[in-house]
Image (tube, grey):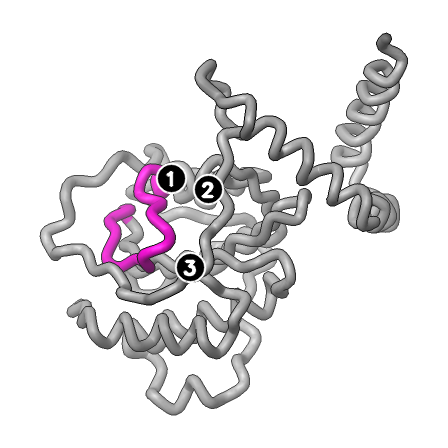
Amino acid sequence: MSDDAANIDYIVRDLMSGNSTITAATLLTQEGNVVFQTSNWDISSDIIGVLNSWRQQSPSVVVQGIKYSTLQCTPERLVSTNILGQGHIVASIESNRILLAYVTPDGGAGVAYMDVARALSQITGSAGPEAAAQAPAQPPMQPQAFQQPQEYQEQAYQQPQQYAQPQYEAQQEEMRPVPKSTWASSAPGTEMKNIIWEVEEFRKFVERGDLAAFLRNLLTEGDQVKIWEVLKLIRHFKSLSQLE
């Protein structure tokens, strides 16, 4: 497959202008080699972890220190969201290419995924230039568990060798920054200011009523595993509130 830098840049710009809640994107191979990335989002160090989490159908992925809970995980799609309202991560696979994108908190993860999948089809050549003007069709979704090719079933992704083709970086001006955090890291060097920032963001999340909405949805869905985890958090909060 030939990756035309100018063509990729044009398609990604068109994707981000058509859906303003998509503010960053990375194109890579299924082996984890970066082909193209927007200038505001260098996630090279996170790629292998994301691919492994996707392949293993993990309950979450971590990008730039922020945990995104998995909503949909099939061979052709990844849709995840941060429960503290820090945005979404979506990705699509086609023809040995993966288009991974960050979506702002006010964006719809499902809609963004369809836009990303359509853009990837344009990049790989399976969609004509007129596809951008058409309403995106619902991508196929397999109900069965994620099945891996036989040659990959016994091994996880390994850090890839240097990609022979030069990496391309989108030259876009005044691009919106993507949230970062050290909260998901257990490194002892985590800065206190980042911890304070995370707590403040959670306070805002609770204050605007998003936590209540999350709990309502959780109780409606009846996911016993998640409910049990939330109960443990509630009990822990209660014990903390009793400390003097």
On the image, the x and y values in percent for residue 197 come to 61, 34
CA gap between label 2 and label 3 equals 12 Å
On the image, the x and y values in percent for residue 66 come to 53, 39
Residue denoted by label 2: 63
Residue denoted by label 1: 46
Marked residue nearer the N-terminal end (2 or 1):
1
**Which element is circle 1 on?**
helix
Look at the numbered discs 3 and 1 and tell me whether their residues touch, using CB distance below 8 Å. no
Residue denoted by label 3: 24
Query: Is 207 placed left or right of 162 in the picture?
Result: right
Marked residue nearer the N-terminal end (3 or 1):
3
On the image, the x and y values in percent for residue 198 come to 62, 34
**Which element is circle 3 on?**
strand
Residue 26 sits in which quadrant? bottom left
| Res 149 label | none
Marked residue nearer the N-terminal end (2 or 3):
3
**Direction left: furthest residue:** 164
CA gap between label 2 and label 1 equals 6 Å
Task: Write down the region rendered in magenta.
Answer: 31-48
- Which residue is at 48% across, 41% downward? 180
- Nearest the eye: 146 or 81: 81
- Which residue is at 49% across, 25% downward? 185
Relative to 141, is 54 above or below? above
Relative to 57, is 244 above or below? above
Q: Nearer the viewer, mark 3 or mark 1?
A: 3
Look at the numbered discs 2 and 1 and tell me whether their residues touch, using CB distance below 8 Å. yes
- Badge 2 amino acid: Val
- Badge 3 amino acid: Ala
Pointer 2: residues within 10 angstroms few (<14), some, or many (20+)? many
